[in-house]
Amino acid sequence: MQQYTEQISQSSYRIVDFSENEIDLTDAYSDFVFSFDSIEDKVIVTASSYSNEAPWLFYLNDDSGITFQMNFSNDVVLELLNGDWSIDIFLEEQFTLYRKDVSSGVVRYLTFQKI
């Protein structure tokens, strides 16, 4: 977990792919830049004259291993990113997360690319 935290807190990221049940929602996030602050455990999102922040963390989940979590409020677009995400792929330049809501069957994939 520490390796993941250190790696993403050293750079800024853009969302290059976000899908919900195979529907591409990426365009809604194209202007956002995400910076993960590991000291204050918050993610800062900026775009031209916009800014928002939320708590974030990696934690060990008994069921699925390492879990990534964000919790935005007051922004409908960013609130879609909330919740517990499992790590699908974690590379030096990008990482992909996925989330399946058991009750609704909604499956989301989220890919961040280092900029």
Image (cartoon, rainbow, N blue to C red):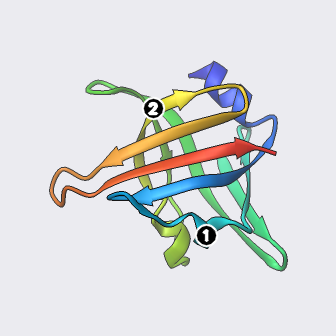
Q: Is residue 13 above or below residue 90?
A: below
Residue highlighted by disc 2: 88
Instruction: Kindly identify the residue that appears in the image at 37 percent across and 57 percent down.
Output: 22
Q: Is residue 39 left or right of residue 98?
A: right
Q: Is residue 53 left or right of residue 85?
A: right
The location of residue 3, given as percent across then percent down, is 65, 19
Residue highlighted by disc 1: 27
Q: Quadrant of residue 93?
A: top right
The location of residue 43, given as percent across then percent down, is 67, 52
Instruction: Kindly identify the residue that appears in the image at 64 percent across and 54 percent down.
Output: 15
The location of residue 54, given as percent across then percent down, is 60, 59
Q: Quadrant of residue 62?
A: top left
The location of residue 64, given as percent across then percent down, is 31, 27
User: Label 2 sits on what residue type?
Assistant: Asp
Q: Quadrant of residue 49?
A: bottom right
Please identify, in this view, whether the residue under mark 1 or under mark 2 is nearer the observer: 1
User: Label 1 sits on what residue type?
Assistant: Asp
* Residue in the foreground of this view, choosing between 105 and 82: 105
Number of residues whose C-alpha sits closer than 10 Å to that of mark 1, classed few (under 14), some (14–19) or many (20 or more): few
